[in-house]
Image (cartoon, rainbow, N blue to C red):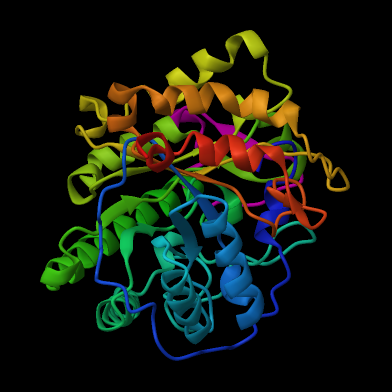
Amino acid sequence: MSDGNHMQRGILPLLAIAFCFAGSGGLALANGAEDSAGTIGIVTANVAWESPTDARATFAEIAGAGFSSVRIGLKNPVTSTYAALAAANEAGLRILITFPLVDGSVSIAGTPPRAATKRFFNAFGLSQIDLLRFERRVDDLLDFVESNRIPLLGLELGNEINWSGYNGDLPLRQTGEVIFDRAAFAPDVAARFDAGMVRYRQVLEIARASLAARPTLANVKLLSAGLADINSAFIRQSGATYIAPTLVYDDYVRQHVFALTDAVGIHLYEPLRRASQKIARPGMIETQLADCGQQAFANRPCWITEFGSALPETDCAIEDDGRIALVRPLLDYLAAPDRAQRVPYAFYYDWDADKSFALNRCGSPTALVDALSGANGDNRQH
């Protein structure tokens, strides 16, 4: 996401290949089972758009590399996503599902999205969510999870709702805008954003009730959306509108979002960029995660639903010493038991779909894979 690659993740090829295969892994239902502290998982956001063979291979590689959990996006057609969930289960992986809110699947029929540009796909706003469509979609998903005994760790509602890339309520302009103060909001933008936050609280209420109606899913955690963590220079150059996470958290308080969730989604990229000063890196991580498990977040822990560090797309970097050094302070943070209780999960972005952030490069995993799996809570315990 950082180093100018964030939009590339949003505009990965949109060819959705439908597939479905029968059966799950036959595993006992393990929804919400807790890992050891500081567990590292892998993001496979668009795996549902892979062929069945490629999806199985991806999950087998991830499990074989020593990881026990993956983050999967709910993509259309949903049959493809459901097949990917079953494939992850077959590989013995537990799953965090990210539920998109701005791709039109739960938007009010007939309302237009914010138009696409050369850099951004079209996106609906949170304010355009149809609550009945959302309820049907989340019920269908949870019915599939329950009936197929999918080991669901958590459900993350939305993704990076604090910037134009994933919230059509926030405009695109020739020069982007970074908003750190409510006073800087244009009145029309503020009105749309506020309406979207009201609607966001409502979808959380619906999801909370849907989970509560299914006793077998009692341990599944409901997460708020991981918020974008992007450098200001990139935002201005891209033409996007970016709302500082602190302002969104203020809205979470006003809308009682923390009370509705079990954990707070966090995206962490800026401390892991080469442009960040090495001496400041641990402090940047501490600052970004300071409110996790604390009163400011209503004592909710954080799940880092995305973190990562980029390389040039053509760099195989089998040794990958540079990225290991950038990521090491975060791994050290997660290894401390008191901090790991406040941040029990962290998902690296990603396995092999993003050419900049990928762990599996030029057909082989880099040394960063071993560093991540070696720091995994499961591996430390065993």
Quadrant of image for the C terminus: top left
Can you give x and y, in whole percent of width and height, for residue 135 in the image? 28, 76
Can you give x and y, in whole percent of width and height, for residue 270 in the image? 61, 29
Task: Judge left or right: residue 95 versus residue 307.
Answer: left
Does residue 342 appear anywhere in the picture?
A: yes
Q: Which residues are magenta?
A: 170-187
Instruction: Tell me the quarter of the picture where residue 304 sits.
Output: top left
**Above or below for 138 versus 192:** below
Residue visible at 15% across and 70% down?
A: 216
304 and 6: which is toward the camera? 304
**Above or below for 247 versus 111:** above
Residue occupying the far right of the picture: 314
Task: Judge left or right: residue 197 versus residue 333.
Answer: left
68 and 262: which is toward the camera? 68
Can you give x and y, in whole percent of width and height, for residue 328 in the image? 57, 24
- Does the magenta-highlighted stretch encompass residue 134? no
Instruction: Tell me the quarter of the picture where residue 143 sits.
Output: bottom left
Q: Main secondary structure of the magenta part?
A: loop
Residue visible at 52% across and 15% down?
A: 282
Can you give x and y, in whole percent of width and height, for residue 314 in the image? 88, 47
Residue visible at 71% across and 62% down?
A: 11
**Above or below for 253 versus 161:** above
Quadrant of image for the N terminus: top right
Residue occupying the far front of the picture: 382
202 and 364: which is toward the camera? 364
Instruction: Tell me the quarter of the picture where residue 377 sits.
Output: top left
